[in-house]
Image: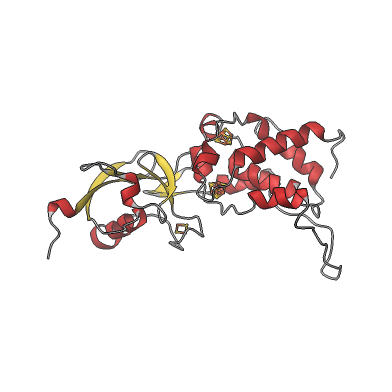
């Protein structure tokens, strides 16, 4: 049996690249339907040329982030009912902000991850595989600070939500700086001086206006704002001289 009109969901989906436009679709309304379910229905049953990205469907991979009714979200963990509150509301799905659109709902994440590298958001040790394991006390302040920020899955929701990234495209952004902070607190890492230099540039932590959108929107309930504040404090207390 065909669903009745009241069982249908009105959806507007971004099509094309930067110069694209929204295209309307009607999708059957389902119980517990996620935004990703609606996108998948369109691609599988209405228009197979729709491009979008997802993998796990359970909030682990971070690849399904899109702009849903003006706000960056994981589409696999966002129920349609969370977004549409009144009868007649339309679901509007667009690609993430601040990243080039490849096509439709898929953005190019290259610049996002390049900034992790620029912020030295990767571990550098000085031991080989024959050396004994270096123990880190789970109760130490450094380990606790790293733990508080370490569960980032690189979804880009915070980056797309940060107004400073929009105003200042070279700003490293909340995710890269959050990752840098976890490594500042990694007592095994040997590139601390270079990392502090990397995050203290004009495009680094001091450009954060502490607006808090990243922390408000992070689906993992992380607090990049606090991590960036930590980087600012660490820069003030760090001895001058650079080096590793
Ligand atoms: S900090 Fe949160 S919102 Fe930002 S990339 Fe990591 S998981 Fe996503
Ligand atoms: S707190 Fe800083 S990094 Fe986070 S959204 Fe605001 S300006 Fe961007
Ligand atoms: S599909 Fe993996 S987080 Fe949504």
Q: Residue furthest front?
A: 139
Which color scheme does this rendered protein use?
secondary structure
Give the answer, above or below, for where 89 lies relative to 40.
above
| Residue at the farthest bottom position | 130
In this rendered view, identify the residue nearer to me: 10 or 79: 79
**Residue at point 43% right, 61% down?**
57
Which residue: 73% across, 54% down? 123
Q: Position of residue 60 (x, y in %)?
A: 51, 60
> Quadrant location of the C terminus?
top right
Q: Is residue 161 left or right of residue 47?
A: right
Please indicate whether residue 145 sits to the left or right of residue 113 in the image.
right
Quarter occupied by residue 136: bottom right
**Front one among 230 and 158:** 230
**Is residue 63 shown left or right of residue 105?**
right
Name which residue lies at 74% across and 34% down: 233
Left or right of residue 50: residue 155: right
Where, by quadrant of the figure, is residue 134 drawn? bottom right
Q: Answer whether residue 115 is visible to the viewer in this image.
A: no
Residue 220 percent across, percent down from the top left = 54, 51
Q: Quadrant of the N terminus?
A: bottom left
Visible residue check, residue 140: yes
Q: Is residue 15 above or below residue 39?
A: above
Q: Position of residue 191 (x, y in %)?
A: 80, 48
């Amino acid at each position: 049996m065909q669903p009745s009109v009241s069982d249908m969901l009105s959806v507007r989906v971004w099509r094309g690249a930067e110069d694209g436009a929204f295209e309307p679709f009607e999708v059957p309304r389902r119980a517990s339907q996620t935004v990703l379910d609606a996108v998948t229905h369109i691609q599988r049953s209405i228009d197979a040329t729709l491009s979008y990205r997802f993998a796990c469907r359970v909030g682990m991979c971070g690849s399904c982030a899109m702009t849903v009714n003006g706000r960056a979200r994981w589409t696999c963990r966002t129920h349609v009912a969370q977004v549409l509150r009144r009868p007649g509301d339309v679901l509007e799905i667009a690609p993430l902000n601040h990243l080039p659109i490849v096509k439709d709902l898929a953005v190019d994440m290259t610049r996002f991850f390049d900034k992790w590298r620029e912020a030295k958001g990767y571990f550098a040790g000085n031991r080989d595989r024959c050396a004994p394991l270096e123990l880190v006390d789970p109760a130490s302040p450094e380990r606790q600070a790293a733990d508080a920020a370490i569960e980032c899955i690189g979804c880009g929701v915070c980056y797309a939500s940060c107004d400073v990234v929009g105003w200042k495209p070279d700003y490293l952004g909340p995710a890269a700086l959050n990752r840098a902070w976890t490594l500042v607190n990694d007592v095994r890492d040997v590139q601390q001086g270079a990392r502090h230099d990397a995050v203290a540039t004009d495009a680094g932590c001091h450009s954060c206006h502490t607006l808090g959108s990243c922390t408000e929107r992070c689906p993992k309930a992380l607090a990049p704002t606090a991590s960036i504040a930590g980087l600012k404090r660490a820069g003030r207390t760090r001895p001058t001289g650079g080096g590793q």
